[in-house]
Image: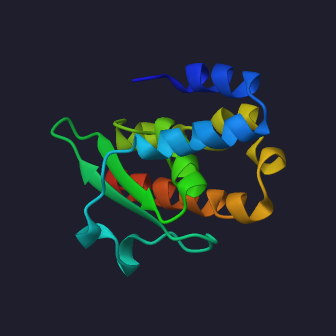
Amino acid sequence: MTSLTDIHDEYDFLDADDRYRLLIDLGRALEPMPDALKGDATLVRGCSASVWVYPTRLENGALHFLADSNAAITKGIIALVLMTVQDLPPSAITMIDIEALLAPFDLKNQLSSNRTQGIPNMIALIRETAARYAGG
């Protein structure tokens, strides 16, 4: 799996159109989320596109998230967010500064506000889920 740093190195090198394509490719690479999991309970509120996030717990106690969106670039954004937390213990996820890890991508200035308005809600849902599993 490609690291967040590797993705950023490539992203930083690209022009705006190619950055969109990179995000779309990241979204396409997400593990498929079954349609049965795409419902009101897994819907991220406040996103202009529909975004669903579903946590599963691995045998070692780590959280693994399934996610999808009905918009290609938004799906790439959630893929990028998940790269910061995927398959980590819930207690570790609660300690991660996801915004700081995503800051080098400068998404708010690279993408339209419609595409980025839901990012804080995606992050909040992931943090709340991790806190719940961590017992806090």
Q: Residue furthest left?
A: 59
The residue under the point 47% across, 55% down is: 126
Residue 12 quadrant: top right
Residue 72 quadrant: bottom right
User: Does residue 29 lie above or below 44 as drawn?
Assistant: above
The location of residue 95, given as percent across then percent down, is: 53, 39
Indicate left or right for 50 with 37 as reference: right
Q: Is residue 100 visible?
A: yes
User: Does residue 73 lie above or below 84 as drawn?
Assistant: below
The residue under the point 40% across, 55% down is: 67
Q: Can you say which quadrant of the picture contains the C terminus?
A: bottom left
Camera-side residue of 39 and 72: 72
Scheme by which the image is coloured: rainbow
Q: Can you say which quadrant of the picture contains the N terminus?
A: top left
Indicate left or right for 105 with 66 as reference: right
Camera-side residue of 116 and 103: 116
The location of residue 36, given as percent across then percent down, is: 24, 71
Indicate left or right for 61 with 82 as reference: left
The residue under the point 67% across, 19% down is: 9
Camera-side residue of 63 and 22: 22
The residue under the point 54% across, 47% down is: 76
